[in-house]
Amino acid sequence: SKMLEIRNLRAEVDNKQILKGLNLEIGAGEIHAIMGPNGAGKSTLSYVLSGKPGYTVTDGSACFMGKDLLAMEPHERAAAGLFLGFQYPVEIAGVSNLHFLRAAANAQRKTRGEEELSAGEFIKIASKEAKALGINPEMLKRPVNVGFSGGEKKRNEMMQMAVLQPKLAILDETDSGLDIDALRIVSESINRVMRQPDRSVLLITHYQRLLDHVKPDFVHVLVKGQIVRSGGAELALELEREGYGELVA
Ligand code: ADP
Ligand code: MG
Ligand code: MG
């Protein structure tokens, strides 16, 4: 069954066309990687799917678990099980990490018709995940991402993902700026939380390195707003060896 179905997606920002007829299908249980040169539109794709203001869809469709994703508000997308991890995670002053996470988790539970978690119940779950990710429990009380180091933000993003248990995670350059240990921890977390028959991942990355740890079922190359080539995990290795070459010409 299809988790995400994108057809002929065209989108612009500041009246500039960035996505130019993008097609992509992600099945349940699959991990897809998108690679491509700088400026290809990779981050734009993740912003459009998240419903970020300023990104205008001019044509095409995106269907998430059978629903019209583009018709949903950003918070509805999240509540339906879409998770966006960002290249530059947002800071939210004045809202503790723990409060933010519990509100998000409970919004999802409500959508699924489940009981909300009390503060006490949630602290237990969050503390366990923090430990698995090597996150200092004190970080849970701090405002979301404010003053976090690059590595802490990435671990925190994985923490959010583990607590939310999304159906589809879109991770934009989750590997950027990570040292070897952090890369291993983040990869383990993606595999543990998301390598499930009813979950899927869209992994946006510049480097093959992450794909050694999180093995994709499919690899796509995005160039100038379109997917110009698709293959298996071996395609990432080929790109690493040979560069984008004729694909960008
Ligand atoms: P990637 O993530 O693949 O490196 P992006 O999606 O960030 O690429 O950017 C795609 C293109 O859109 C780039 O040419 C970039 O300069 C342009 N772009 C991104 N944001 C804006 C904006 N706010 N206004 C105008 N152009 C933008
Ligand atoms: Mg970029
Ligand atoms: Mg980008």
Image (tube, helix red, strand yellow):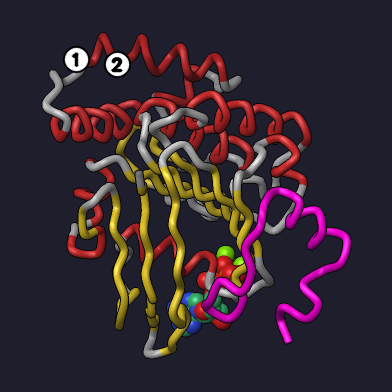
**Left or right: 119 as drawn, with respect to 36:** left
Residue at image mark 1: 118
Residue at image point 46% right, 73% down: 22
Residue 122's disc is 2
Is residue 228 magenta-colored? yes
Residue with the most extreme front position: 1
Element at label 2: helix
Q: Residue furthest bottom?
A: 15
Query: Quick one: label 2, few (<14), some, or many (20+) residues within 10 Å?
Result: some
State the mark number for residue 79.
none
Residue 183, x across and y down, in percent: 70, 35
Q: Quadrant of the C terminus?
A: bottom right
Disc 1, SS? loop
- Name the spot of residue 152 as percent of width and height, x first: 58, 35
- The structure residue drawn at horizontal position 26% and vertical position 35%, both measured from the top left corner, is 104
In the foreground, 34 or 145: 34
Would you say the residues marked 2 and 1 are in contact, meaning their CB atoms lie under 8 Å apart? yes
Magenta part of the chain: 223-249
